Image (cartoon, grey):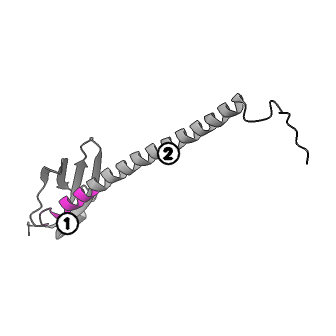
Amino acid sequence: MWRSTERKTGTEGFTLIEVLVALSIVAITLASIGALIATTARGTKSIEAHLTRLEIARAIMTALPDRGQLAPGSLSGEIAGHPWRVDISPFATSNTDSQADAVWTPQTVLMTVRSTTGAAMQISTVRLQRKGGG
């Protein structure tokens, strides 16, 4: 078999433009992956903070006084660096005449839990209190 010892010039390897295009494609891909990872990390941190506030709100709600001792007013405190506030007020109804003979009085309970960054979560519910305090 006969082999040529003559070198072909200009056909071996990559040109400078081909290398630059390949490097730019790799850079764009890595930048996209980095942005995706950063967004995922921020989302995970936000969800963790929300779940922490939710667990604190659940703990506060279960620690509220019994319905017989729940009086209108405000309660506040701090748990694990998260300030919280509970406001208890009479439930506003438009039809109060039919409620005159009711045994139970509804009360609005509004709970606010703030995170260390200032984000707040509010939970509103209604609790019933027996008329006469018992």
Find the distance from the CA under tag 1 to the CA under tag 2.
Answer: 48 Å
Q: Which part of the image, by quadrant, shows the C terminus?
A: bottom left
Which residue: 77% across, 35% down? Answer: 12
Tag 2, which secondary structure?
helix
Q: Is residue 76 left or right of residue 48?
A: left
The spot of residue 45 in percent (x, y) is 35, 49
| Residue span colored magenta | 54-66
Give above or below for 25 relative to 67: above
- Residue 104 sits in which quadrant? bottom left
Label 1 environment density (alpha carbons within 10 Å; few <14, some 14–19, many ≥20)? some
Under mark 1, the amino acid is: Leu
The spot of residue 61 in percent (x, y) is 20, 61
Which residue: 24% across, 43% down? Answer: 116
Q: Nearer the viewer, residue 33 or 59?
A: 33
Q: Residue furthest right?
A: 2
Under mark 2, the amino acid is: Leu
Q: Is residue 100 visible?
A: no
Predominant secondary structure in magenta?
helix
- Mark 2, residue position: 36
Label disc, if present, on residue 128 of the rendered structure: 1
Q: Is residue 58 magenta?
A: yes
- Residue 11 sits in which quadrant? top right
Pointer 1 or 2: first along the chain: 2
The reply to whether callout 1 and callout 2 are in contact (CB within 8 Å) is no
Q: Is residue 121 left or right of residue 18?
A: left
Q: Nearer the viewer, residue 64 or 88?
A: 64
Give above or below for 12 relative to 55: above
Give above or below for 56 relative to 18: below
Which residue: 31% across, 56% down? Answer: 51
